[in-house]
Amino acid sequence: MAETISGWFNSLGLDRAKVIYTIGYSSREFDEFVDLLRKHDVDVLIDVRRYPYSRLEWFSRDGLNRLLSYGIKYYSFPELGALGIAKHVKAYS
């Protein structure tokens, strides 16, 4: 697994991760989420949800692509997410 993660960081143009944070989102607005990322100098967000969709439209994969306009790169690696079926989440189109 470590070799795989190292390969992903290299493919993203990163030598290695200096610090890895986790972040909750369910009670946050998009602007608050961005402010929190910026406060901690996060410039890359890696989404490891198997199903990168949310009831909060801005927190679905397509919504998070907006982060680039704030100088934060967004990548989705669903293969790292837990297996299961997200029956209660509807994808936005």
Image: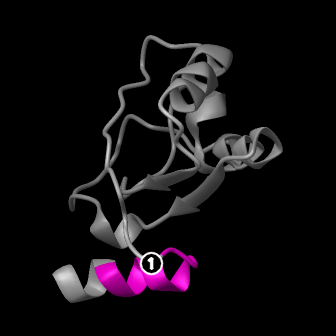
Q: Is most of the magenta stretch helix, strand or loop?
A: helix
- For image coordinates 28% across by 85% down, the residue present is 4
Q: Is residue 1 visible?
A: no
Q: Quadrant of residue 13?
A: bottom right
Q: Amino acid at mark 1?
A: Asp
| Coloring applied to the structure | one colour
Closest to the observer: 88 or 34? 34
The foreground one among 78 and 35 is: 35
Note whether 40 is above or below 17 in the view shown. Answer: above
Q: Name the image quarter holding residue 82.
A: bottom left
Q: Which residues are magenta?
A: 6-14
Residue at (28, 60) in percent of width and height: 81
Q: Is residue 22 left or right of residue 9?
A: left
Q: Residue visible at 37% across and 63% down?
A: 17
Res 79 seen here: yes
Compared with 60, 18 (above or below) is below
Could you tell me how many numbered marks the image carries?
1
The residue to which callout 1 is attached is: 15
Q: Position of residue 43 (x, y in %)?
A: 59, 48
Q: Position of residue 74 (x, y in %)?
A: 61, 55
Q: Position of residue 12 (x, y in %)?
A: 56, 76
Which residue is found at the position 42% from the left and 19% from the top? 26
Does the magenta-highlighted stretch encompass residue 35? no
